[in-house]
């Protein structure tokens, strides 16, 4: 009897663990022969994805776009990584895995070039976030933001939130900090005086004095290239 109760308890525990599993189902990707994926980068295969969403008129409205294969950083660039690029930038060891912020567009681009990479385009960023199934959230299912003091103004370590990764295993796509892309911000009907003035930024949080919200995979924001904020960072990409 005792053994039976033990087995039943173990079964209940396993079922509970399965129900509470927050892991994001991953797209199975085969890296072609001859392609080397650098450490902490992800291979995104060639193919179509849905770009934008009809609910947001300043996006591409859900147009199907085909991209060549490319590589993108699994994590946002960290303060520790940036310190190896800029010898004058000092970082406390306890903050080495936090995203590098307070960096303008040209400085972010310079880091990526130094690392043998480049900034991702807006389309590359979105495909890495949403995969190929039109998902609104990188981790697929909506959940309210915990609003527990964590926000884009108080970033977390770049590898902390495994429950919020994309279907390609990319972190930080819809939370943590906003990220520079190489794409100029424009939209249908944009005033001529604003064209060419801003760069698209992606993946941060929408915050008011009352609450914090995740951003959908298609959500577009923009920033003056000279801006430097403590909620704005970046990641790099690379051609295959």
Image: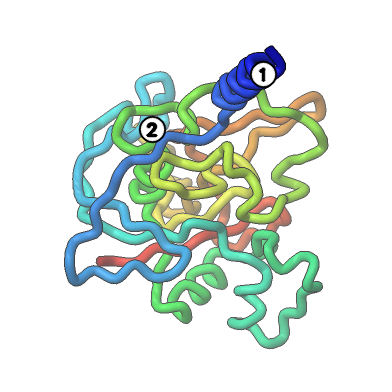
The image shows residue 239 at horizontal and vertical percentages of 28, 66
In what quadrant of the picture does the N terminus appear?
top right
- Is residue 143 visible to the viewer in this orientation of the structure? no
**Which residue is found at the position 58% from the left and 37% from the top?**
163
Near mark 2 (Cα within 10 A), the count class, few <14, some 14-19 or many ≥20, is some
Where disc 2 sits, the SS reads: loop
Seen at 47% across and 46% down, the residue is: 194
Q: Residue furthest top?
A: 1
Relative depth, front residue between 69 and 160: 160
Along the line of sight, which residue is nearer the eye, 104 or 41?
41
**Viewer-side residue, 39 vs 127:** 39
Horizontal side of residue 136 vs 18, given as left or right: left
Please tell me which residue is depicted at 50% across the width and 23% down the height of the picture. Answer: 141
Q: Is residue 222 above or below residue 61?
A: below
Horizontally, residue 16 falls left or right of residue 45, namely: right
Residue at image location 61% in from the left, 41% down from the top: 175
Circle number at residue 9: 1
Total numbered labels = 2
Residue 59, disc:
2
Q: How is the image coloured?
A: rainbow
Residue 98's place in the image compared with 96, above or below, is above
Image quarter for residue 91? bottom right
Mark seen at residue 50: none
Element at label 1: helix
Residue 177 visible in image: yes
- Check disc 1: other Cα within 10 Å, few if <14, some if 14-19, many if 20+: few
Residue placed farthest to the front in the image? 1
């Amino acid at each position: 009897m005792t053994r039976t109760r033990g087995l039943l308890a173990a079964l209940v525990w396993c079922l509970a663990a399965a129900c509470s599993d927050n892991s994001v189902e991953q797209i199975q990707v085969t890296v072609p022969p001859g392609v080397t994926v650098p450490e902490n980068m992800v291979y995104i295969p060639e193919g179509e994805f849905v770009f934008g969403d009809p609910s947001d008129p300043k996006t591409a409205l859900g147009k199907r776009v085909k991209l060549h294969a490319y590589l993108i950083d699994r994590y946002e660039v960290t303060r520790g990584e940036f310190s190896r690029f800029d010898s004058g930038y000092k970082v406390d060891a306890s903050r080495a895995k936090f995203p590098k912020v307070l960096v303008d567009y040209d400085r972010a681009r310079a880091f990526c070039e130094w690392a043998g990479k480049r900034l991702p385009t807006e389309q590359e960023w979105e495909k890495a976030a949403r995969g190929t199934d039109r998902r609104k959230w990188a981790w697929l299912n909506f959940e309210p933001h915990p609003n527990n003091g964590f926000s884009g103004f108080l970033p977390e370590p770049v590898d902390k939130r495994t429950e919020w990764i994309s279907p390609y295993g990319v972190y930080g796509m819809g939370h943590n900090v906003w990220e520079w892309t190489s794409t100029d911000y424009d939209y249908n009907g944009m005033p001529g005086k604003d064209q060419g003035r801003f760069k698209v930024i992606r993946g941060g949080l929408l915050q008011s004095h009352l609450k914090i919200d995740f951003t959908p995979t298609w959500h577009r924001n923009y920033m003056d290239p000279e801006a430097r904020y403590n909620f704005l960072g970046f990641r790099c990409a690379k051609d295959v």
